[in-house]
Amino acid sequence: MPRLLTRFIAGLRRRGRPTAIALALGFMVLLLWLPEAPLPGMQLALFDGYQKAMPRERKNAAVQIVAIDEASLKRYGQWPWPRDRLAELLDKMAAQQPLAIGLDIFMPETDMTSPEALAERLPDSAAAVKSELKAMPRHDVQLAQAMRRIPVVLGAAGLRTPIPGSTPVLRAWPVETVGGDPLPFLRTYPEALASLPLLQGAASGQGLLAAEPEHGVLRRVPLVAAIGGTVLPSLSIELIRVAVGLPALTVNVSPQGVSSVALGDLQVPTQPGGEVLVHFGRHANDRYASALDIMDGKAPDDLLTNRIAIVALTGLGLVDMQTNARGDLLPGADVHAQLTESLFDERWLQRPPSMRRFEAGALAACGLFLIWLLPRVSLRTGVIAWLTLSALLFGGGAAAFSKGGMLFDAATVWLGMTASSLSLLASLFVHEASERRRSDRALQLARESAAKAAGELSAARRIQMATLPVPATAFPSEQRFTVAALLEPAREVGGDLYDFYMLDERRMLFMIGDVSGKGLPASLFMVVAKALSKSVALGMSASPDMAAILNRANRELARENPEMLFVTCIAGILDAQTGDVTMCNAGHDAPRKVTAGGELVRMQPADGPPLCVLDDFEYPVQRYSLAPGDSLCLTTDGISEAMNEQGDLYGVERLDALLAQTHGLGPEALVAAVREDVRHHVGTAEPSDDLTLLVVRWNGAA
């Protein structure tokens, strides 16, 4: 035996196992010490799933809800009814000899329809009528007299914040305590909304209507709570106490909190705060009977015989609807009815404090078994073992719920077991893969890296080029100006950019730029600069000027620039009606104007730094006027610095000479001529920089 234990411990020390063990132990610590489950949402979803799959069977119809519904309100008028009518309803219910009647209704104020209340509102001139009204029986007294003849339990609502009509003092029937004071553990309310003291004195009991949902779902109801320091039972268990005729219920207290609530031979285990986890059943329509049928004598004569009845409002706008763990949206009275039935059937849910220790033990057993087993068997066998344990966990949890109402958190145990197993398998796979492919690892990594880089650059080139506008389709019906452009990256992707678009019906914005650096970083920054500049231009108020657009674009680009890149650019706005051009030059080569007569004019050089160099620089505006047929030619340094195999640059003089010879050519032909001449100069040499050219010709306002 010691040898077997030694071999088991030695096996746990193999590669990957210490991490898996630490992970399993971490989950065990969370299970034992956290006040809630590590993932409470997952735990509640599992427990709610059990309730949906295995609802409580309604063994006996012990509770009948007498609903003051729409039909009742239509016949007898809006709520609140006069108390003498409510007394009449109770008398007719009592004729069927129910075990107890619960009122899910609050009556904190006197009946304003009572004769004496009506008398107070009459003038002194109607003294005779007032005297007769005061001599008539009071409605509250009539209701109290009816309640003395019937075993009635009043409902009271606990309030976190006092409201007008609430009170910290209630009439409560004896509650015996065993093992200590339950008040430190109970849900406590400073005050409650209850019925008049006259009615409390006539009732046979009083119960709390406390049902506070968890994350919008009602799962538990306190069997006992505290109102202003007084222990008060819930309506459900108080109805049973009155029905069986017991003088008091007993609260059993342990050092951890309230352990159970006893009523004679009935022992109901609770959570430490005195709550009981309700096992909900399917919605039963026969649980509801209309108060109108009771009043009209249309209900069966034995409908309430030897049953508990709950009078509740279900009329539209008067009912408090609750979503239970099964997802059913039902009146609050249905919760008390279902809890009362489950207490009669002795069918409730339990999650004792010892359950956490049991779950931690299950996690330890399953986790250590898999940690010991997985390195010794094939992957298929390991998966089968994991599936078997998973089925045992969830199947055992479902069986515990079905047979004993025990809430076993199989989900958290399964998550801890799976996490530790996956950690171990990951370690094993990494180690085995490393051993098996050590000889060709470097080559494989190099191939994968090259393929990945090529694929990414190809995709980046497609994306980058797709962001550029196409001159032939950008202005399909425009006759006032013509635009042509060219961009050829030196590599798969480049840092040059151009753009043009209409700001309004007569103004067209154009720009050309060159991002510092090469390759993918420059291309990404090019896309960002182009998109941001367009967003700024189109997002500004009506008729923004060129300086405002470029100044704001400069500030926005400089704000998010971790690589400290910069952009030289020229941006201008052409007035298609007048030929006027407003332009800003941010550190870029000076543009050229080719007049309709063939004259080449070098325009004003840059009078501002590149974008992202000074984030608060205010760029000045250059203003020009184009005559019909004049063209603006904007280039990047990739043209003037294009290099042949001998290292000779293309140069600005050659570009100027070529442009001077393009008299009569349209923008597209001019771009093609420049591109062909640069290609002839470069020959077979590797491109040294991106080639970008933008030509804008104004044809005239007509």
Image (tube, rainbow, N blue to C red):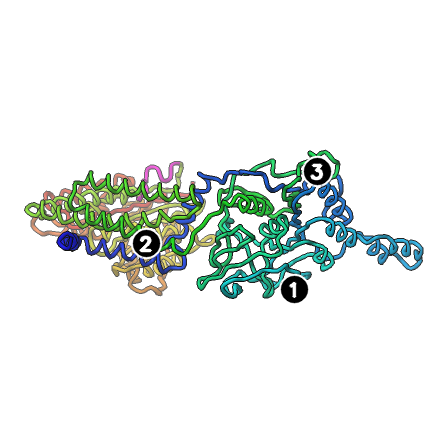
Query: Mark 3 or mark 1, which is nearer to you?
Result: 1
Q: Nearer the viewer, residue 163 or 556?
A: 163
Q: Nearer the viewer, residue 302 or 24?
A: 302
Chief SS of the magenta region: loop
Q: Amino acid at mark 1?
A: Val
Q: Is residue 255 left or right of residue 187?
A: left
Please report the residue visible at 40 percent of the width from the left and 45 percent of the height from the top. Answer: 46
Query: Mark 2 or mark 3, which is nearer to you?
Result: 2
Circle 2 Cα neighbour tier, 10 Å, few/some/many (<14 / 14–19 / ≥20): many
Query: In terms of sequence position, does the residue under pointer 2 or pointer 3 come before the other?
Result: 3
Please report the residue visible at 19 percent of the width from the left and 40 percent of the height from the top. Answer: 379
Contact between marks 2 and 3 (CB within 8 A): the answer is no
Q: Amino acid at mark 2?
A: Ala
Query: In terms of sequence position, does the residue under pointer 3 or pointer 1 come before the other?
Result: 3
Q: CA distance from mark 2 to mark 3?
A: 55 Å
Q: Is residue 471 magenta?
A: yes
- Residue 658 place in picture, x, y as percent: 20, 46
Query: In terms of sequence position, does the residue under pointer 1 or pointer 2 come before the other?
Result: 1
Q: Is residue 308 magenta?
A: no
* Disc number placed over residue 498 in the picture, else none: none
Residue 15 in view, yes or no: no
Q: Which residue is mark 3?
A: 71
- Residue 221 place in picture, x, y as percent: 53, 52
Q: CA distance from mark 3 to mark 1?
A: 36 Å
Q: Tag 1, which secondary structure?
A: loop
Magenta range: 467-476
Q: CA distance from mark 1 to mark 2?
A: 45 Å
Q: Which residue is mark 1?
A: 169
Q: Which residue is mark 2?
A: 360
Q: Amino acid at mark 3?
A: Ala
Q: Is residue 286 left or right of residue 51?
A: right
Rendered-image quadrant of the C terminus: top left
